[in-house]
Amino acid sequence: MGVPVDRARRLLGAVIVAQMLPEGVVVKGANGVRLRHGATGTRATRDLDLLARDPQQALKDLTGFVDRGWGAAPGSKRELKADPAATRVAFFGTVHEDDPAEPLGVPDPYVLSRAKVTLHFLSPRTSWVSVPIEIGRDEFEGSTLAQPVEVVAPQVAEAVTALGCGTPRSVAVMAVEQQLAQKIHAVTDPHQTRGHDLVDIQLLWHGAEAEGGVDIPLLADLVSRTFMFRSPGRTAAGHTPHEWPPPVAHVRTLEQGYLDALEETRVGAEGQARLLQPRVSDAADWLESLITRIARAAGAEGSGAQG
């Protein structure tokens, strides 16, 4: 795949776990970007971020699917001796639940469920890779407003297929408009330091532009809803509301996190990664223009509805 072995294994592990996700569970975060655009030119991550209507039920169902496993490999010597066509499950594992995350401004019902999936290859005696997962509840059922897409980048599919255990199916990934809305909220939040989101926002935007464009009115609706939905939790925590449209002054302070994430995209960089802004100040200017464009679209839509 043109990336370091450890980075490739983490991605392959995440994709294999994604093959076992329960119906209705959606991939988001950096691995959502990588499922769209591949391993090279995107940001590396250890986590598999997910979205579900009922995170605890999704975690329970995932435990069963991971136990049953995915993929097929030739049987053991003893099995093949009895039946030359014998096969066995290639990847299987266990799910270990962790304490829930408690991000600022998120109401209790929407606190992230966290776990770690330990994947084994053929034998339960050794761990092949561990995949941390976080499952969030679908905020204001946003995925019903912006339907997820089924996708797996050709580069990723080819890498998994090369393992010889099966061809991966497409995976449900959060709609680009919904993911942009969440990341715009996160990166502009002065109480968080998420310079990497500024890289992901550009990758998502440029990738969507190359494939037909972003639905701006839908994005405007989703980003406005996201800011409104998360505001009460911030107020309850004693912080000032994070209102839409947000200023980008805080974004300009995220230089190190931005540059670190930018460096990750240069590993085998191709495609949309070449369009990334080289400095955080340039990226902040670009984001400010995007926010202005989205806000204008929301205003125009509102004026049209009143007229």
Image (spheres, rainbow, N blue to C red):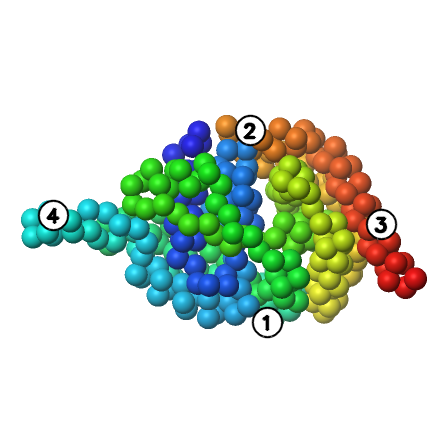
The residue carrying mark 4 is: 84
**Separation (CA) of disc 4 from disc 3:** 66 Å
Query: Which of 211/223 is in front?
Result: 211
Name the secondary structure under disc 4.
loop
Q: Are marks 1 and 2 in contact (CB under 8 Å)?
A: no
Decide: few, some or many residues near mark 4? Use Cα within 10 Å; few <14, some 14-19, many ≥20: few
Marks 3 and 2 sit apart, C-alpha to C-alpha, by 32 Å
As drawn, the label of residue 109 is: 1
Q: Amino acid at mark 3?
A: Arg
Residue 199 visible in this rendered orientation of the protein: no
Name the kind of residue labelled 2 in the image: Glu
Amino acid type at mark 4: Pro
**Closer to the eye: label 4 or 1:** 4
Per the model, the C-alpha gap separating discs 1 and 3 is: 32 Å
* Residue beneath disc 3: 296
Quadrant of the drawing holding the C terminus: bottom right
Nearest to N terminus: mark 4 or mark 1: 4
The residue identified by callout 2 is: 270
Q: Residue at x 41, y 67 (%)?
A: 61
